[in-house]
Amino acid sequence: MRTLTSICPGCSIGCGLYLLESEGGERRHGLKVAHRTVAPMNEGKLCKFGMQLPAYYDKEALHNSVDGKEVNHEEAIEAARERLSSMNPEEIAFIALPGTITNEELVSFTSLASEFGCENLSFGFERFFRDIPEEAFYVLEHGLPFSDVEAASKIILFFVDPFVHYPLLARRILKAKRNGARIIEVSFTKNERGLADETIVVAPHEFESLREKKELFEDSLIIGELTPYTNPHLVSLMLWLQASTSSRLFLLKPFLNVTGALLISGGGKGAEKRKDLFEIFDRIDRGKIKALYLLETDPVSVLLGGEEVKKTLSKLDVLIEQNVFRTPLSEIATITLGSEPFYKKKGTIVNIEGRVLDLGGESANGLAILERMGKGRSYEDVHEEVKKRLGLGSSEPSEFEIAVTRTERKFGVAFLVEFIDSFLSLLKMGNDEERGEEGYSLWYKTNPFFWAGVRDKQFVEISPAAMRTLGLFSGDEIELVQGDLKERLGFKISDVPDDLIVSEDKLAIQPSDGHWAELHRRELLTSVALRRAKRSSTAEE
Ligand code: SF4
């Protein structure tokens, strides 16, 4: 058995752990997880996702192929370079949702995009920088050390249930609570585990009330979440609450290396120049973008509406997929390039606290693929570039320091108010026009399994009132209906508002309806109808 020091790629916390690999170094069937108590990010504790990492790594490997034929590494790289070179820059796009991607690979990926003169590059968070003042960019780019969470005297959980969304964050909040902090949750429903001292339940269309309660946010640490689906207006509302009170805002993110991706690609200013993820999908749908390079990104499993994603991406002339595992897109990819699993990688990431973590592996295959098509640099050269872009000078940071720090700044709120107003009127409009027949709202509580495309729970939570209305009995199944889309699954009765359905799994119900460019206008909740699923004839008898 070899013991490898590793990082969990499940979310932006980046918990430290050991992976025990059986002799021979074979990935499949050979890994075990062990706790690493000295890791400062998580002090040895892991959530269910971290404990199940061997299953995460035990997937079918992606091989090198061109037009469905297996080829060697060199042939696949050469074919990718040739196909991209035959396109106009505006016809090419590059997407990397930075979950298992090192800082070094991100430097090479951005360089590769610019080698082809291409500006259609996305790390999944670009649009959020377009509608906020530049002085506020730092809040989206940087996180905060967990020691600041533990030292806070008042914590506001802003539509975040830490036990579900970021399990290891919950421990820090419990420590803050033991230190005397008051915990308040602002949510559509109460946290089942009773973490908060007070819950402000917000009805789906009554966000206005939060502005009226702004004194609640004074002297607090507001903890929220930023995902590719977060409504930018909600981000503005959180920033407005920070700017108009004496509070600070801490935004958790689902993909491990988002902070690294944002910082080494120029932060918010860089993001403004790139393209939004869904804008790229829209341009693919309309035939404007014809070639896409996906770096360790499986949009079919990661995003809602996977079938729509696949339909859109199948319109491409050239789809290049660089990954370690096969994905639902591998069968339609024009070129596949196999790389190494995350735990074997040589490189660094930046976690949400600002720690620059060395992954400790020995392989730089993924980086070499990108560099062979681009500038041809060595790992060492690119690593030096990473340190420069992160402002680290010549030093090699250790996991025990917060190398990438955040400086608080003041920013204005006038522009934000106008933007939030348009959001509130949009919600009212949505309320009248988009509610499902039975008027239920679905809230996705995202979590590490959600973003890894794994169905963990297989049920949704509904209210006792909904159970009575639908005449449900234990053992029944329910059906969620959104237009032509249906999802049949189990249910659990919880203390949620009468018209709310909570899902921790990704369901067939989707926000896009194929209109990618419109995604930023979506509500925070999705309107659905809720029905009792037809019992099988044997069960009815
Ligand atoms: S998913 Fe996040 S919280 Fe869970 S073990 Fe991995 S990094 Fe830690």
Image (tube, grey):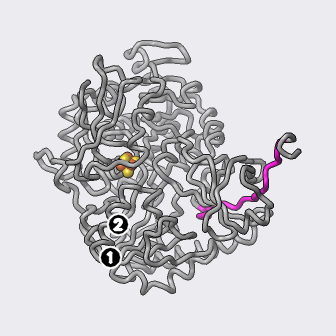
Identify the residue at horizontal 22%, vertical 35% (top origin): 360
Q: Secondary structure at mark 1?
A: loop
Q: Which residues are magenta?
A: 521-536
Q: Mark 1 touching mark 2, by CB under 8 A?
A: yes
Q: Cα distance, mark 1 to mark 2?
A: 9 Å
User: Where in the figure is residue 341, as x and y percent of width and height?
Assistant: 36, 30
Image position of 292 with respect to 43: above or below:
above
Graded by Cα atoms within 10 Å as few (under 14), some (14 to 19) or many (20 or more), the crowding at tag 2 reads many
Q: Nearer the viewer, residue 274 or 137?
A: 137
Identify the residue at horizontal 65%, vertical 61% (top origin): 493
Q: Which residue is mark 1?
A: 181
Which badge, 1 or 2, comes first in the chain's sequence? 2
Apparent side of residue 291 relative to residue 368 in the rendered image (left or right): right
Identify the residue at horizontal 69%, vertical 66% (top origin): 464
User: Where in the figure is residue 19, as x and y percent of width and height?
Assistant: 30, 34
Q: Nearer the viewer, residue 4 or 429?
A: 4
How many circles with numbers are drawn on the protein?
Answer: 2
Q: Amino acid at mark 2?
A: Ile
Identify the residue at horizontal 75%, vertical 68% (top origin): 433
Q: Amino acid at mark 1?
A: Ala
Q: Is residue 13 visible?
A: yes
Q: Which residue is mark 2?
A: 173
